[in-house]
Image: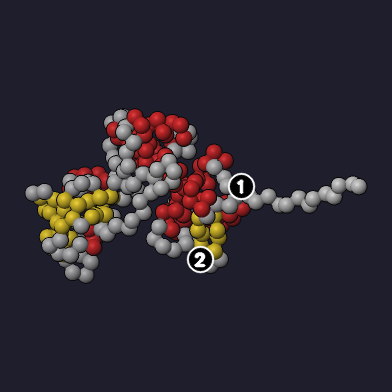
Amino acid sequence: MPKSKRSARPRAPQPATTGALTGQAEDYLKAIYELERHGSAAGTNDIAARLGIAAASVSGMVQRLARLGLVRAERYRGARLTDAGRTVALQLIRRHRIIECYLVERLGFGWDDVHDEAERLEHAASDELIAKMAEAIGNPTEDPHGAPIPTAAGEVDETRLPSIADLAEGGSATVVRVSDRDPAFLRYLDELGVRPGATVQVVAKAPFGGPLTLRVGASEHAVGTSAAAQVYIRL
């Protein structure tokens, strides 16, 4: 008797790897990851603002990432990463932060000079190169700005931290992490002595969102609320 033919089952889309994506697509995954950390889906306008592009160009890329199984597009809400998308995003973030550490520790870059360099290099570096760079500098767990480095297995501390702006008058805390997106902001913090590991105290808070008076070491500085909100602390 002739053998019956089995109907072919449709194959599920295989999760993409960083090597199969363009640098632009990788940047989208990182942006969505960072926006999702605040608890809601990443909206089109938010993604566009984070990447510095027109909102009209976002939908097409989100749809492409959805077809690759990396993103779930929620109508009227935005985009969320799938487990596969989150894995790729964390691989990229690991690359970025290890490259930053290597540039600072081995090549003498300032902490305000490494973000853009790492953005360019992260798309080309192999996993083997990143592993060797990490080993060469002692397998750091945080980047120069205090951000946690995901492990090679994709584990990362995602604890949400309060900022200096959340401190009550008279309160003190240790700086753990600072926003690294603006080199001028990092140079400003450096002038104040506000870096990961520094102890800060809120001497006074002006009402109605006015500036804070911070004591850092033996010095006092007036710091705007928006700047204080970008410096994360541990009480």
Query: Dot 1: within a 10 Å radius of its alpha carbon, few (fewer than 14), some, or many (20 or more) residues?
Result: few
Q: Please give the label number shown on residue 77.
A: 2
Residue at the location (16% across, 51% down)?
199
- Residue contact between numbered discs 1 and 2, judged by CB atoms under 8 Å: no
The spot of residue 202 in percent (x, y) is: 15, 59
Q: How is the image coloured?
A: secondary structure
Q: Is residue 166 above or below residue 219?
A: below
Q: Earlier in the sequence, mark 1 or mark 2?
A: 1
In the image, farthest residue toward the left:
218
- Number of numbered markers: 2
Q: CA distance from mark 1 to mark 2?
A: 25 Å
Secondary element under disc 2, as helix, strand or loop, is loop
Kind of residue indicated by mark 1: Gln
Residue 114 is situated, as x and y percent measured from the top left of the image, at 34, 38
Asked whether, in this view, residue 150 is left or right of residue 65, the answer is left
* Quadrant of res 190: top left
Could you say where residue 3 lies in the image, as x and y percent from the top left? Answer: 86, 47
- Decide if residue 141 is in sight here: yes
In percent of width and height, residue 130 lies at 42, 34
Which residue is at 40% across, 57% downward?
Answer: 37
Front label number (1 vs 2): 1
In this view, the residue farthest toward the right is: 1
The answer to whether 210 is drawn above or below residue 57 in the figure is below
Which residue is under mark 1?
14
